[in-house]
Image: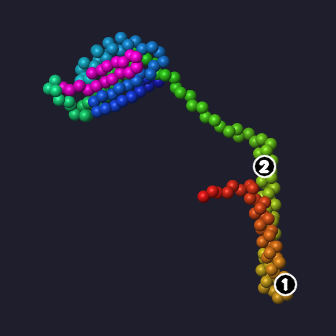
């Protein structure tokens, strides 16, 4: 990890940035101040270190004529100041904090006895249901033929086919997930 990971942007304005310094090891503050004093004079940046809060503020200052440069110049100088600050932190011995470990809970995928019994019941129910649907289809065909032929009992076959089809649905209902609107 780089020392840029030691900096956390806390506040940002058009001409000002405040960073919190996060380091696992103690920082040599005098060394950091000396580094910034040597590297920042070429830029129109002022800086202030707050040791108790472990933060540093970089602020773009106006030119000699009292006018503030355009936002592009302020932004580019603040970026350069951030680079100088990063190199100063590296020289001052700052090390980034350890990576945060994220715990993820997962369910075990190993089948247990109840899951195995549920799977077997599901297969048995499915096969019996398919057989009942085929029987119901045959009863419907016989019922329709019986309604067309004179003196043939068609209505009882249709009623029996309906009851067998309902029994097939009733066997499958506990194993089929219902959708909730």
The stretch of residues the image draws in magenta is 46-63
Compared to residue 173, the image places residue 7 above or below, namely: above
Q: How many marks?
A: 2
The image shows residue 124 at horizontal and vertical percentages of 81, 56
Q: Which residue is mark 2?
A: 118
Q: For residue 52: magenta?
A: yes
Circle 1 Cα neighbour tier, 10 Å, few/some/many (<14 / 14–19 / ≥20): few
The span from disc 2 to disc 1 (Cα, nearest Å) is: 44 Å
Sequence order check, earlier mark of 2 and 1: 2
The answer, for residue 72, to whether it is visible in the render is yes
Left-right relation of 60 to 141: left
Q: For residue 28: magenta?
A: no
Give the quadrant of residue 7. top left
Left-right relation of 29 to 124: left
Quadrant the C terminus occupies: bottom right
Instruction: Name the mark on residue 152.
Output: 1
The image shows residue 76 at horizontal and vertical percentages of 28, 30
């Amino acid at each position: 990890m780089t020392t840029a990971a030691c900096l956390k942007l806390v506040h940002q304005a058009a001409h000002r940035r405040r960073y919190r310094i996060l380091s696992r090891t103690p920082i040599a503050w005098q060394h950091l101040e000396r580094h910034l004093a040597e590297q920042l004079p070429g830029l129109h940046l002022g800086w202030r270190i707050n040791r108790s809060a472990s933060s540093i503020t970089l602020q773009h200052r106006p030119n000699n004529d009292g006018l503030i440069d355009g936002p592009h110049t302020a932004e580019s100088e603040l970026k350069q100041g951030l680079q100088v600050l990063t190199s100063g932190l590296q020289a001052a011995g700052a090390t980034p904090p350890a990576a945060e470990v994220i715990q993820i809970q997962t369910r075990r995928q190993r089948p247990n006895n109840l899951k195995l019994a549920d799977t077997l019941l599901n297969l048995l129910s499915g096969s019996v249901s398919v057989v009942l649907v085929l029987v119901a289809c045959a009863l419907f065909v016989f019922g329709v033929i019986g309604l067309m032929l004179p003196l043939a009992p068609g209505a009882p076959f249709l009623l029996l086919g309906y009851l067998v089809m309902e029994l097939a649905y009733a066997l499958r209902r506990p194993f089929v997930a219902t959708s909730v609107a």
